[in-house]
Image (spheres, rainbow, N blue to C red):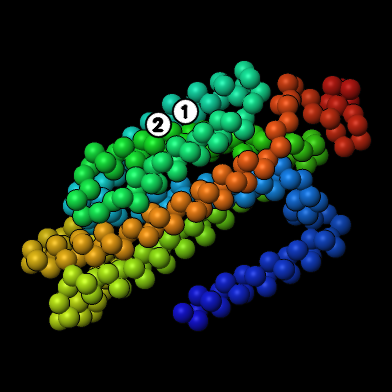
Amino acid sequence: SWQIVGLYSASAILLAAFVRVERRAAEPVLPLRLWKSSIFTFSNIAGMGVAMSMFGAIFFLPVFIQGVIGNSVTNSGAILVPMLVAMIVTSIGSGQFISRTGHYKMPLLVGLLFRGAGFVVLSTFDIHTTNQTAIEAMILIGLGLGVTMQTYTLIVQNSVSRDDMAVATSATQLSRSIGAAVGLAILGTILTQGMASSMSKYLPAAALKQFQTSGASTAGAVFDPTQLANLPAAIAAGIRHGLADAMHPVFVAGLPILAVAFIATLLIKEVPLRQTAHVAAGRGRSIASED
């Protein structure tokens, strides 16, 4: 639609204006010189990809569980629990490994591979998918998330000076937030457009028109189980089939996003981790020497 295209165009113009202002500012909010560091740049790119895929899985999987498999609201939320448990396990394990060995690149790559495997499983979801398959996908994604969630922040903090520590950390969190917002917008658009075309394959013209007129032809409608429960069985089955087809490209879209994150991680230069909090200041003095 022209509204969406217009918003993206306005965003591009405002981004260009932001860069111009920051280049001339005496004390920029986000110093552009940070982007000259390949470690900073590739870490933020990878972090954006991780956030895009993470929130895509967390937001849209319950839609599938509830709208296609037919679980209750409580059970669709409980599906995410195995992912959270897996995140805790690998977060602790990867933290111990990185702190003891000083190597962070290999755990990141392995974590991204786990997440990619999880999205491969998600891309196979259809009307016959069971809760067990969904849990397996969540565990794989959770194993990868535990490694990747905070490690990119660690990499950025390890690569900048003491003076830039705060702004570099904030920029990393900003990149992650932008990735989450843009990812949800893109994946939500894919789902909405997919539903518009997939529903027509399974519903009669009259039923499709009534379904669209009622305002239930959106992804959010499947969060209300009463809407499907009050429909004839054949119509409800058609809606579930249509939603399953529409969700497929959403999960597939996560794979190229993770591929970009994987390539960006490969390009990150691994440097030794600092062994002390006394980071050198911009004038070459350390905190200890200033004391």
* Residue 56: mark: none
Horizontal placement of 19 versus 140: left or right?
A: right
| Residue 11, visible in the rendered structure | yes
Q: Position of residue 138 (x, y in %)?
A: 35, 40
Distance from the alpha carbon under mark 2 to that under mark 1: 6 Å
Using the image as rendered, state which of residue 166 and residue 8 is in the foreground: 8
User: What residue is drawn where x is 79% and y is 25%?
Assistant: 278
User: What residue is drawn where x is 84% and y is 21%?
Assistant: 288
In which quadrant of the rendered image does the C terminus lie? top right
Q: Position of residue 21 (x, y in %)?
A: 79, 65
The secondary element bearing badge 1 is classed as helix
Q: Position of residue 44 (x, y in %)?
A: 64, 48
User: What residue is drawn where x is 36% and y is 64%?
Assistant: 191
Identified by mark 1, the residue type is: Thr
* Residue 86: mark: 2
Residue that badge 1 annotates: 90
Identified by mark 2, the residue type is: Ala
User: What residue is drawn where x is 29% and y is 38%?
Assistant: 135
| Residue 31, visible in the rendered structure | no
Horizontal placement of 237 versus 54: left or right?
A: left
Location of residue 81 (image quadrant):
top left
